[in-house]
Amino acid sequence: MTLQDPLVGQTLDGRYRVETRIAVGGMATVYRAVDTRLDRVLALKVMHPGLAADGGFVDRFIREAKAVARLAHPNVVGVYDQGTDGTYVYLAMEYIAGCTLRDVMRERGALHPRAALDILEPVLAGLGAAHRAGLVHRDMKPENVLIGDDGRVKVVDFGLVRAVDTNTTATTGGVLGTVSYMAPEQIENGATDARTDVYACGLLLYEMLTGGKPHTGDTAMQVIYQRLHEDITPPSVTVPGLAPQLDWLVAGAAARDAALRPADAVELLARLHTARQALTDEQLDAVPAAARPMPPAVGSEEPTTAVRYAEPAEALNRTSLLASPPPPPAARRRSSGSGGNSRGSRRGPAALLAAILVIVGLCAGVWYVAEGQFTRTPAVVDLTQAQAEHDLRAAGLDVKVATDYSESVDRGKVISTDPATGERVRDNGTVTITVSKGPERVSVPDVTGKALVAARQQLRQVGLTPGTVTREFSDEVDAGQVISTDPKSGTSRGPDSPVGITVSRGQPVDVPDVVGDSVDDARSSLEDAGLTVKVAKTPVYSDAADPGDVALQTPGPDGQLGQGDTVTLTLSKGQQIVDVPDVDGKSVDEAKKILKDAGFDVRVIQFFFTGKVNNQSPGAGQQAAKGSTITLWVS
């Protein structure tokens, strides 16, 4: 017997009527619900009551609402509302009719490269918007990629999201995320940033191309060990014939060293575009060996793990109708009576008919005011401009066209509509369609020879983001000036793409050896070489330097530094003087051990093969420098 979900049929917060359960996760259950105030279908994510008592879980849950509500992107599932009703903590979210990427891969196995890139591209666009807003998803996996019945791809479930500028190391409660898609640094110490999501996307692409995960094992520990110690095998090893550009894309995104990955999803999206442009139609449409044909439709039963939202269109267009009131009591009496005059009998049916006509007219008027003068915006997103205009005009609507750049929608296709798909619009009203101009591109400027501050400023002025700064020695470029950029000048990149900068440290300086010198002599030698000197506060014992002279220098004389770099000097306290232990009467081995443990070397003068110590120099109780030699006489 199947137990009825206690929430189904209830109305949360006096507004959200729960209709059916559609998915169950580790933290929450997702329901299809109706917003009775706005009369629209939405997804209601309700935290499990057992977790609602935990303040940490509630905070994380609310953080999801605030984080995703900040994102206005067509490839991120929107959050409309957040609230609490008794023990129920919930999110009201955009409702997507379709399935998850996991459902697609379960049915299809490996995907064609074209299909895999078509899915990954909007995923990266949505994640890129999150990364540029300072947010990290931290749990990217196929179950969190929704594919709508209209072909739109959206990222969902930012329940583990955390702002980049907050502590991103899980110090309590273990590491959050799904082991199969965790990055090595996330497993080792819980550290996460945008590159953690990039790693998971690399694994998603690998799985879509090959039909399987790159690391497998009987236990989670086996998977974790492989993740930490083994690089991802190129997809072409599993699927011979895959283009090398796809291997390059996966290897870069899923590099074990986070520093070798793209900085965020926007940079990975740019790499995807570069790889895709180099692929032929034959390479994009290559059929992988692990691909399975689409199965025929078989009834209405669906996998229990599928997120299916498709419902009859009528459910979106329900309106409340006014019930007709009963006829007036007098009319009923006259129509049922047998003794009235003929004039009254004739007047009764006429009055009743007039009342009915008035009521029908009233209902029709109410219907027209509330609903009849409206239609719904047709679904034209991702259609070409010509197709969209045709469909909208066929629905009796006027069309206004705007344009904008898009990283995820092809040039000439519709990015969005206003009003949005399915929203009400007056008959003969105007729908504004925003048509894609394709991805915006910016040329990397030449900042060679400029100071780092000026180079960063120029990159920002053209719409690029200054990236990681690397410093190298150069015989040609003065210290502090830019040697090169990555990518190099003249390269086209999307807006806000990071640009790495290599800055000159100037000509290398050979570090002189000043150990054993006085402080003044050492300072003079180092400053003459163009270096800065710092003296450590705490001196150390030293056998190589007299008290007050230099005992250690960091870096040492075998290294190279740039002009102005710092060398730290540690001064000597002289030799360390310690008490000599008493080993008189001890065996040779026991005496040696005692003296060596005290820090001395030992010399033995022995007249017989066996015997005990009968004399030592220096004697017991005297003091000697640590590391000096104690002589033993044995007889």
Image: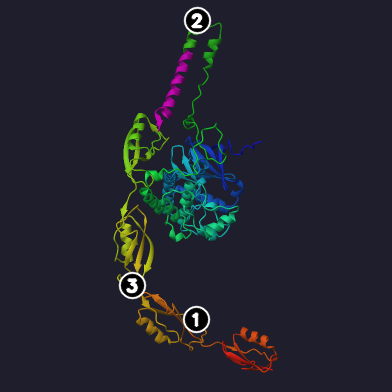
CA neighbours of label 3 inside 10 A, class few (<14), some (14 to 19), many (20+): many
Query: Residue 427, image x and y in percent?
Result: 37, 29
Residues marked 3 and 1 touching at CB (< 8 Å): no
Q: Which disc, if any, is residue 11?
A: none
Instruction: Report whether 254 appears left or right of 304.
Output: left
Q: Nearer the viewer, residue 66 or 73?
A: 73
Q: Which residue type carries mark 2?
A: Ser
Q: Nearer the viewer, mark 1 or mark 2?
A: 1
- Residue corresponding to mark 1: 538
Query: Residue 504, image x and y in percent?
Result: 34, 69
| 94 in relation to 318, above or below | below
Q: Which disc, if any, is residue 506?
A: 3
Looking at the rendered structure, the secondary structure element under dot 1 is loop
**Which region is colored magenta?**
351-376
On-image quarter of the N terminus: top right
Query: Residue 34, image x and y in percent?
Result: 51, 36
| 464 in relation to 340, above or below | below
Which numbered disc, 1 or 2, marks the residue that appears first in the sequence? 2
Q: Nearer the viewer, residue 8 or 196?
A: 196
Our reading of the magenta stretch's main secondary structure is helix
Residue at screen point 33% across, 58% down: 460
Which numbered disc, 3 or 1, marks the residue that appears first in the sequence? 3
Gap in Å between the C-alphas at discs 3 and 2? 118 Å
Gap in Å between the C-alphas at discs 1 and 2? 124 Å
Count of numbered circles on the image: 3
- Residue corresponding to mark 2: 342
